Structure formats: C-alpha cells, structure tokens
Image (cartoon, rainbow, N blue to C red):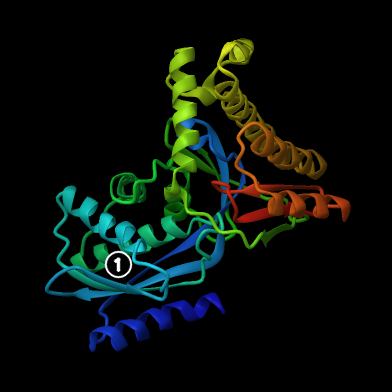
Amino acid sequence: MAASNAAARADSLFHSTFGARSSHFGSASGRVNLIGDHIDYAGGTVLPMAIDARTHVAAARAAHDIAVSEWTEDDAWQRYAFGVLAELRERGLDIPPLAIAVASDVPVGAGLSSSAALEVAVARAALSVAGAEISLREIALACQRAEHLHAGVPCGIMDQWCVAHAAPREAIALDCAALVSRTVALPPALRIEIVDSGVRHALRDGGYAARRADVDAAAEALGVAHLARLSRERWREIDALPERMARRARHVVTEHARVDAAIEALSRDDLARFGALLSESHASLRDDFDVSVPELDALVDDAMSRGALGARMTGGGFGGCAIIAW
C-alpha cells in the first residue's frame, strides 16, 4: 500500500468512526538504524536513517480523548498515543481532549520505529489542534517519556529523535549522551535494502527491558555513567564481570566503536569497510546481546552469499528486519 495513501486513510477512518471531519493532521516517518543498536540508552552514538513509510494521524477536538486505528489486534497502541497527550499536558501545553484516527505504512514490530512514528505523529497533530509549538528536541523527549511511563518500554532516545528530526532517506549521527546530532551524507553508490524477516516482536514483553537492566548493571559495576563511553583502556575490566553482563557490556563498547568507524568509512566512501562493520555488528547482537533470531540470521547469511557488502539485524531485535548494504 503506498505511503501517500495513509493520510487519506486516516481522514476516512476518522469520518467513518466519529461521523465528522478531522480538522488537523500530523505525520511522522519510520526509521531504520544503519548501525548502533542497544547503545542509545548506554550513551552511545547511533546512525539511524529516516525511511519513506509514514504514520498519519487525523485529529479534532472532542469531549474526551478517544482514538481509533487501522490496527485491530488489540488496543495496546493507545497507551503510546494517550501517553503522548498526557506528557504534552504535563509540560503545561493546553492540549484539549482529542479524537484521533491513525493510519500507517510503517509495519508494526518490524524494528522500523512504528511506536516512535505513532508518538511523534500524535504529538504533531495535538500541537496543531492546540496552535502550540515546541522544539523538535522537546517533541522527542516528550515521546520518549510517554513510552517509558505509559507503554512500559525503557527505550533510549534514538527512535524518537530520528523520527522527529530526520528527513526521509537522511542519516543522522546522534550522540545520545549529549543529545547532539548531525547529518551524515550517504555515498551515492551505497544502496540500503530493508528485508522483513516476518517475525514480529513486542518490546514491552520484557526482553528489551532485561537487556537494558544488564547494561545498567554493567555500567554501575564499572563505575561509569554511560557504558558506551568506557575508555578502550578499561575494556579488559569487562572480563571480570559476570558472564552474561560481560557479554552485554562487550557488545555496547564495541558497537559504539563500530558506529564511529562506520561514520568515518562513509566519509571516505569506503563501502567495503562500512559493510564489514555491519556484519560485525550483527555477530555482536547475535552472540553477545542475544537479540537476533534464526530468521534474521538466515537473511544475513543469504545476503552475504549473494555478494552483499554487509548485513545485520536492525532495531530492538527478537524479530523485525535486516538491512543489507550493496
């Protein structure tokens, strides 16, 4: 289904559900992370890229908050939407009760930031109704807080930041400790393919939170605020940690180093080096972080057998998509 139809679908869904026309709209793209998974909440640098697929929200004032979407499996998504409204109001913004309808071309559970796209689209629609403006930084932080407090997912800032800031097909390097980002040019010869494994995940099911708990525990044990920033001279201290914690920490510090190396490789148009780093990242996520699944491993192996520069799972893991560099 073409991404350009989602806005019309949201408007039509609003009309058919609420018997009136929507007055305001908001939209946001999904994102794919080129490299740097599970290090945003450890203070690392990540390299996400916005994609063309978007989520659209049609909205209007109502007697109370009410929401409907194309998703019919359950109403869990409403926690994200209503959480955003609550967080905007918590910031003192005069957001009235809203009726909202959601349509999206960002696949749910595929590691392409469907939740962040929903959150940012809801925020933009709500701000439009209220006639209010806040910075992109504040939108991202409000949406992250909504996911923490209302959806129960202790995510880092990468998804919301990229979705709020980046234009489609634009990569950004985000320092998650300092909350500073810059655009990274992608070489014209580089082609990024996104392949869906067909395995769906829900980050609220506990696997993501467990990985973050391990990372936080490792940072505390090593006495650092941001595990990703542990100096290379101290990496040997990781070996003294409990085995599982050590593997989690090893992924974080090496992944952060790979992101820096990937950005440098892109700046030199060194696509072979960039591809090799993607493959190293997948091995680390598979072996040290335990977030890959056989279907993702098979996609990566198949891509490499066909001559890809590199390939890796992307996103939180436990399913979703792989990215392939050609």
State how many labels appear.
1
Q: Nearer the viewer, residue 121 or 287?
A: 287
| Residue 295 in which image quadrant | bottom right
Tell me which residue sits at (56%, 15%) in the image.
241
Q: Secondary structure at mark 1?
A: helix
Question: Where residue 312 appears, x then y in whole percent?
Answer: 70, 47
Can residue 175 be seen here?
no
Residue at 63% x, 14% y: name it. 239
Three-letter code, disc 1: Ala
Within the image, what quadrant is residue 250 found in?
top right
- Tell whether 60 sits left or right of 231: left
Residue located 62% across and 15% down the image? 232
Determine the residue positioned at 66% across, 59% down.
Answer: 197
* The residue positioned farthest toward the left in the image shown: 63
State whether residue 15 appears in this view: yes
Decide: few, some or many residues near mark 1? Use Cα within 10 Å; few <14, some 14-19, many ≥20: many
In the picture shown, does residue 114 fall above or below 255? below
Q: Quadrant of residue 23?
A: bottom left
Give the left or right position of residue 307, taking residue 91 as reference: right
Counting from the top left corner in percent of width and height, residue 73 is at 42, 70
Residue matched to label 1: 125
Q: Quadrant of the N terminus?
A: bottom right
Q: Quadrant of the C terminus?
A: bottom right
